Amino acid sequence: MTTQEGSEAFHIELIRDGDEESIVENIDLANLSLENAKAVSDAWVADNPIVSFTYYNPDDSVVQRGLDRLEEALPYLYVTCDKLGRVRIERFGEAIYFEPSGL
């Protein structure tokens, strides 16, 4: 995350299953993580992923369809999002990489 003071790092684990109380508790934990974000250097940002998503889902077909759509959309996202960096999609132990043409 970039603020007026510079870049900050944080970790959020979004859990959207369970009852309403557990979902609200997870939202509170996510907000706490954002409030406690730590300042990081530009060198740290260059050496570490800016965003990482890991999905755990017993129904792989939903995840696979979502990843298919992401792969289709990435070329268009690179045209419209100048801050979008390298993207790695890993499926079944094999990784596919996407990067903007300027890298």
Image: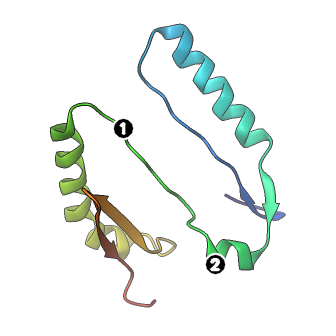
Which residue corresponds to the image point at 51% horizontal and 34% vertical from the top-left?
14
Identify which amino acid the numbered label 2 is placed on: Ala
Q: Nearer the viewer, residue 39 or 54?
A: 54
Mark identifier at residue 56: 1
Query: Which SS class for mark 2?
Result: helix
Q: Is residue 77 above or below residue 70?
A: below
Other residues around mark 1 within 10 Å, as few (<14) / some (14–19) / many (≥20) = few
Farthest residue, direction bottom? 102
Image coords of residue 24 (percent x, y)? 58, 17
Image coords of residue 67 (percent x, y)? 24, 53
Q: Is residue 61 left or right of residue 91?
A: left
Q: Mark 2 or mark 1, which is nearer the start of the sequence?
A: 2
Q: Nearer the viewer, residue 82 or 55?
A: 55
Other residues around mark 2 within 10 Å, as few (<14) / some (14–19) / many (≥20) = few
Location of residue 91 (image quadrant) = bottom left
Quarter in which the N terminus is drawn: bottom right
Identify which amino acid the numbered label 1 is placed on: Tyr
Give the colour scheme shown. Answer: rainbow
Which residue corresponds to the image point at 43% horizontal and 91% vertical from the top-left?
102
Which residue corresponds to the image point at 53% horizontal and 58% vertical from the top-left?
51
Which residue corresponds to the image point at 37% horizontal and 88% vertical from the top-left?
101
Farthest residue, direction front? 93
Image coords of residue 83 (percent x, y)? 52, 72
Query: Which SS class for mark 1?
Result: loop
Q: Looking at the image, how many numbered discs can be counted on the residues?
A: 2
Task: Name the residue beneath numbered marker 2.
Answer: 46
Mark identifier at residue 41: none
Give the alpha-carbon distance from disc 1 to disc 2, as whole Å: 27 Å
Asked if disc 1 and disc 2 are in contact, CB closer than 8 Å, the reply is no
Q: Is residue 100 left or right of residue 67?
A: right
In front: label 1 or label 2 = 1
Q: Is residue 22 left or right of residue 2?
A: left
